[in-house]
């Protein structure tokens, strides 16, 4: 069997730096080297909406915890967005170098988030979702 050809999900020519699928497998969230997050329907690849994440200029990772989209990258902060509107709901701070990866425990009560950064530090956060 030959796999189907890949679909183009990104609506821009930016490099894709991170992507995540929500727990219901309904949406795919894509972040890139500019300050935007893109949302696509997971089954069809149709673009649903996008939003600015300014002043963040380059995201490198994204994850979904409940109704919260977690984005990190070039800065020391971790941006929290609500999935219903793609608007910023908060920021987590505590790393001393850029965040390089995000891990989640989505089915855990409270929404546990793990982040790693360029200086070798790993942190755990409770999002209360």
Image (cartoon, helix red, strand yellow):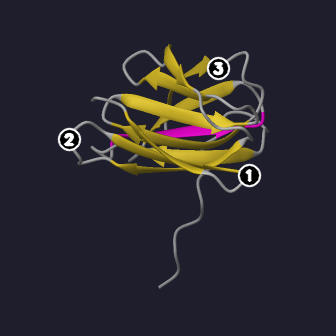
Percent of width and height locating residue 97: 74, 41
- 101 or 63, which is in the foreground? 101
Residue 27: say if magenta. yes
According to the picture, the residue beneath numbered tag 3 turns out to be: 53
According to the picture, the residue beneath numbered tag 1 turns out to be: 119
Percent of width and height locating residue 55: 73, 16
The crowding category of the residue bearing disc 3, from other C-alpha atoms within 10 Å (few below 14, some 14 to 19, many at least 20), is many
Percent of width and height locating residue 128: 29, 29
- 112 or 68, which is in the foreground? 112
Q: Earlier in the sequence, mark 3 or mark 1?
A: 3
Residue 67: say if magenta. no
Q: CA distance from mark 3 to mark 1?
A: 24 Å
Q: Is residue 12 left or right of residue 78?
A: right
Quadrant housing residue 67: top left
Label 3: state its secondary structure: loop
Percent of width and height locating residue 24: 27, 43
Q: Earlier in the sequence, mark 2 or mark 1?
A: 2
Q: Name the front one of labels 2 and 1.
A: 1
Q: Which residues are magenta?
A: 26-33
The crowding category of the residue bearing disc 1, from other C-alpha atoms within 10 Å (few below 14, some 14 to 19, many at least 20), is few
According to the picture, the residue beneath numbered tag 2 turns out to be: 109
Label 1: state its secondary structure: loop
Q: Is residue 37 left or right of residue 118?
A: left
Q: Earlier in the sequence, mark 3 or mark 2?
A: 3
Residue at the (59%, 53%) spot, across then down = 7
The crowding category of the residue bearing disc 2, from other C-alpha atoms within 10 Å (few below 14, some 14 to 19, many at least 20), is few
């Amino acid at each position: 069997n030959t796999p189907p050809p890949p679909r183009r999900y990104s609506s821009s020519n930016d490099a894709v730096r991170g992507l995540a699928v929500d727990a219901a497998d309904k949406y795919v969230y894509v972040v890139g080297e500019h300050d935007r997050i893109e949302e696509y329907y997971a089954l069809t690849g149709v673009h649903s909406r996008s939003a600015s994440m300014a002043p963040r200029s380059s995201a490198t990772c994204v994850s979904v915890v409940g109704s919260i989209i977690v984005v990190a990258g070039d800065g020391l902060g971790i941006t929290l967005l609500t999935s219903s509107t793609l608007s910023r709901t908060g920021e987590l701070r505590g790393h001393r170098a850029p965040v390089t990866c995000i891990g989640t425990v989505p089915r855990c009560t409270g929404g546990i988030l793990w982040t790693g950064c360029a200086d070798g530090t790993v942190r755990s956060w409770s999002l209360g979702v």
